[in-house]
Amino acid sequence: MNRRNWPVFFVSIGALLVIVILVGIGGYFYWQLRGDNLRLIEAKKSLESQLTALQNNLATTTLALQTEQAKTTAFASQLNGLAGTVGTLDKLSKTDKELLQKYSKVYFLNEHYLPSNFATITPVYLFNPKRSEQVHANIWPYLERLLVTASSSNVKLDVVSAYRSFAEQKSLKSKYLVSYGSGANKFSADQGYSEHQLGTTLDFSTATGVLSTSFDKTAQFAWLLANAYKYGFTLSYPKGNDYYQYEPWHWRFVGVALATKLHNEDKHFYDLSQRTIDQYLVNIFD
């Protein structure tokens, strides 16, 4: 080789070495990056797999939680229902079971029966203010509202008779038998069969105090027919009943719910079965 060509040779050799070094370094970094990418891909796959597993676990846990929540809700509902039932039974146990029984020639009320407590009717509402008349204390608020509301409507209702004991009913019936013979059975109950002994029954009249079927021609009767149910009262012995003669003056407290049902369905207390009536006992004073 000509000496003059050595510089070119060495430059070529140097350039080649630089190229080889650069290729080597590039290859190194290429494989390094490729390895890093592969590791990243594997890590990504691993993370995705873990994420999928976590999502599956979360879905399973959520489902289990929802199932437990549903069980808890159902249990709470059962507890509430049980508490309600216990409350109802407790309330029913404290409510006089005699109050909604059918007495007229059907159910007997013994001579020792007394309402649990009494309230005295305000004299201004009595036909005879000098004679004390009492009712079951729990119905007095209803009766008082009825009387006050009627009065505010310019309808003066006079209470002729309220609570009567077993002995009083026996004495009254004896007097009627003397005067009317067996005919007294058409309008007067024997002792133990009178709704008045409950303390929840009233005989209403006008200022005359006369208990007559003509009472149904008065404004008082018309008002009672239209409004008494709102205060829990119902007419016991309508026309055509199977127990006593028509008594438009005789009204019994049966609770607002039952009285409203009877009014809306145009029925009377003795039209219903005792089983149906008993369903209203627990709420009689609500």
Image: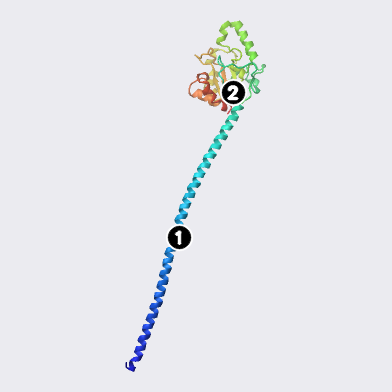
Q: Amino acid at mark 2?
A: Lys
The quarter in which the C terminus is drawn is: top right
- In this picture, residue 114 sits left or right of residue 57: right
Display colour scheme:
rainbow
Q: Is 82 or 269 nearer to us in this picture?
A: 82
Q: Relative to 12, does residue 196 appear above or below in the rendering?
A: above
Furthest toward the left, the residue is: 1
Disc nearest the viewer among 1 and 2: 1
**Residue 103 image offset from top left, x and y in percent:** 57, 17
The residue that disc 2 covers is: 97
Q: At x 38% / y 85%, what residue is drawn? A: 14
Q: Residue at x 37, y 84 (%)?
A: 15
Going by the numbered disc 1, the residue's amino acid type is Leu
Is 269 located above or below residue 27 in the figure?
A: above
Q: Residue 158 location in percent, x, y?
A: 60, 18
At a point 43% along the width and 68% down the height, the residue shown is: 36
Secondary structure of the residue carrying numbered label 1: helix
- Residue assigned mark 1: 47
For residue 104, which quarter of the picture? Answer: top right
**Can see residue 23?**
yes
Real-space Cα separation, disc 1 to disc 2, in angstroms: 73 Å
> In this view of the protein, can residue 227 be seen by the observer?
no
Q: In the drawing, does residue 245 fall left or right of residue 2? A: right
Decide which of 140, 26 is in the foreground and name it: 26
Q: Quadrant of the N terminus?
A: bottom left
Q: Position of residue 170 (x, y in %)?
A: 63, 11
